[in-house]
Image (spheres, rainbow, N blue to C red):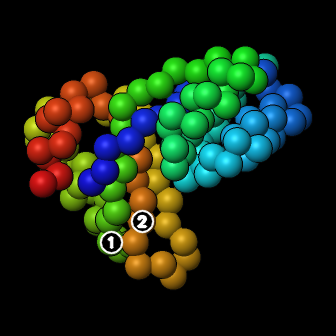
Amino acid sequence: MAKTKQFTISLDNQPGAVAAIARTLGDAKVNILSLLGTVQGTAGSVQLIVDDARRAKKALDSARISYQETPAESLDLPNKPGALSQCLNKLAAKGVNLSSIHATAAKGGKKAVVVYTAETVVKAATATA
């Protein structure tokens, strides 16, 4: 498990909105490791995990893109049925209330990557140990 930062950016639901964020970070040599975007009506949000949070903040600030920075956890799980359930059951048993979660795995890959934020990050760290 690795501690990281999640950036949440609110945006208008329009063509190119996410591309502008990706361009801003790419131009600053910030690699996006994980991205989740959602929309409701005319507004949406993007949640990002990047390889260099300090550089990302500088790039977003320079571009005047507002964001919320939240402590997050990133962990690798076996890419097999039940692995996510086992992890989430451990977190729940410790009283960890998830605020957000997203996960992905490459088809045929041996691992899945899960990123989550929680109301109780300290408890989350001990739940997966």
Residue 70's place in the image compared with 106, above or below, is above
Kindly state the secondary structure of the residue where label 2 is placed.
strand
**What residue appears at the point 40 percent right and 72 percent down from the top-left corner?**
111
Percent of width and height locating residue 34: 55, 50
Q: Quadrant of residue 27?
A: top right
Kindly state the secondary structure of the residue where label 1 is placed.
strand
Percent of width and height locating residue 23: 79, 42
**What residue appears at the point 18 percent right and 43 percent down from the top-left corner?**
125
Q: Quadrant of residue 110?
A: bottom left
Q: Earlier in the sequence, mark 1 or mark 2?
A: 1
Q: Return the residue at label 1.
A: 78
Tags 1 and 2 touching, CB below 8 Å: yes
Percent of width and height locating residue 61: 65, 21
Q: Return the residue at label 2.
A: 112
Judged left or right of residue 34, residue 26 is right
The label number, if any, that marks residue 39 in the structure image = none
Residue 5's place in the image compared with 30, above or below, is above
The C terminus: image quadrant: bottom left
Question: Is residue 40 shown to the viewer in this render?
Answer: no
